[in-house]
Amino acid sequence: MLDERGDLRDTCRDDDFIGASAAVVSTARHEDALGFHFVSADGRNDWTAVTTVSVD
């Protein structure tokens, strides 16, 4: 992960942050379900967040 201050991986070694995902969605009117997969480096935490995006 990068931002203007540099690499963020070393600041995310504990449970304060679980990860980050991004999606590009169309600006056309629609509704979609999007899944974002997160897994820890040791594999003990492995889950998917499902979100609904609605563009009106």
Image (tube, rainbow, N blue to C red):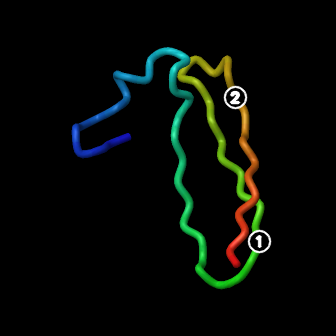
Check contact, mark 2 vs mark 1: CB within 8 A: no
Q: Secondary structure at mark 2?
A: strand
Residue 53 drawn at (x, y percent): 71, 63
User: Residue at coordinates 71% horizontally, 57% vertically from top-left?
Assistant: 34
> Badge 2, how many Cα within 10 Å: few under 14, some, many 20+?
few
Residue under the image location 71 percent in, 51 percent down: 35
Tag 1: amino acid: Glu
Assess disc 1: are there few (<14), some (14-19) or many (≥20) residues with their C-alpha within 10 Å of its C-alpha: few
Between 8 and 27, the one lying in front of the other is 27
Residue 6 horizontal/vertical position (percent): 24, 37
**24 sits to left or right of 55:** left
Q: Residue at x 29, y 35 (%)?
A: 7
Give the residue at mark 1. 31
- Residue 20 is left or right of residue 56, and the answer is left
- Front residue of 54/32: it is 54
Q: Secondary structure at mark 1?
A: strand
Spatial CA span between label 2 and label 1: 26 Å
Q: Point out the tag, 2 or 1, that comes first from the N-terminus.
A: 1
Please tell me in which quadrant of the rendered image residue 32 appears: bottom right
Quickly name the residue at label 2.
Answer: 46
Quick one: quadrant of the C terminus?
Answer: bottom right
Q: The disc labelled 2 sits on which kind of residue?
A: Asp
